[in-house]
Image (cartoon, grey):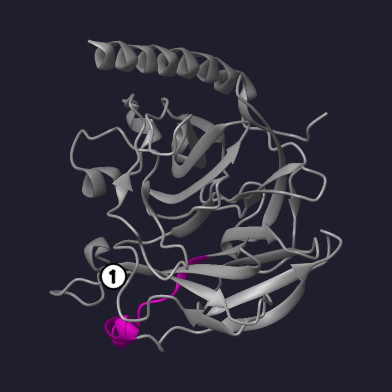
Amino acid sequence: MKSNLVLRFWLLLILLTAGSLARATNNRGSALVGLRKCMDSYLRDASICVGLDNSWYLTGTTDPPKGIQIWKSSDHISWQSLGIVWKPGGSPWHKPYVEQGRPLWAPEIHFINGTYWLTYSMPGWSSKDPGFYDPAHSGCGLLKSSSGKPEGPYVDMQPNERLGDEIDASLFQDDDGSVYYLWHSGKIAKMKPDMSGLAESYHWLKPVVSDPDPQHHSGLCPLIFGKDSLTHIGYEGVFMFKTNGLYYLCGSDHGEGGRYSCYVSTSRNIYGPYSARYEALPYCGHNTFFQDENKQWWSTFFGNDGIPWREQPGILPVTINSDTGILSGKDE
């Protein structure tokens, strides 16, 4: 009886939260207040972290994607390239990907436990048609800077097999110091203390309330989740952060008109239950969130839809609170 009451309480809380966030979403429009471009260079899936020196470090998917390149900014305006800091091919699990000419996708940079970490992904192939992308054969991994510097050198933490079974890997560190590996559309697993691998089987985080509007889903969703499966944070680009006691689960999916957007769901517990998702930042799909030295929150941006530019990195100040969710614009 007690467990049923607890479940009912959580469901009521989630539905109330979903209603307030939906009202906020309807009022926010598509304005990207304060958005500014980092540089006039091709870069998708932009990721930024703040380093020990308060400099900002940027990476993402380059073209051609020969490896992971990092840029540094000390003034948050001009960016200096640190070059390509790592190339795939040295780990045994990379062999079939390299043989099939698979690219490197969506690296992220994180500063955790006194050093820099890079997550990376490699898309799979079809056994019947090597030129066809098959998520079942995709993989992602984790790199550690052995020098403690953003330029590396980097070592693969699990060189013999992929850490995740699909793409778009990320990291999240909780308040107690525990580090979690996330990937694709909400898969998450706690890592071993030395971050050499996963300490548990993965959980698949999903909102408890489905989003039935077909305009809010990519055409890939039925292929990934099955027909009429509408309970997911997004079909790619998962990211997590925590503030004011709330876990924010973020993913990429389509908003009105097919725009590529950042969807968000929240919970008081890392493994859920998570609230109904809402379109937090239109046109900002596959983004990461970070705080600067002044505690201002920012989102990365790259212009997948060509609004206001296409496939070049930018940053967007955001305001975050539990009542209105995530809004573009600086905290007052």
Name the residue located 60 percent from the left edge and 52 percent from the top edge.
Answer: 303
On screen, residue 35 above or below 28: below
- In this figure, which residue is indicated by the disc labeled 1? 124
Furthest residue in direction right, as rendered = 75
Spot occupied by residue 213 in the image (x, y as percentages of width and height): 34, 26
Q: Quadrant of residue 102?
A: bottom left
On screen, residue 148 above or below 215: below
Say whether residue 291 is visible. Answer: yes
Residue 305 vs residue 81: left or right?
left
The number of callouts visible is 1
Spot occupied by residue 324 in the image (x, y as percentages of width and height): 62, 21
Spot occupied by residue 58 in the image (x, y as percentages of width and height): 67, 65
Q: Quadrant of the C terminus?
A: top right
Q: Secondary structure at mark 1?
A: loop
Residue 232 part of the magenta segment: no
Q: Nearer the viewer, residue 304 or 109?
A: 109
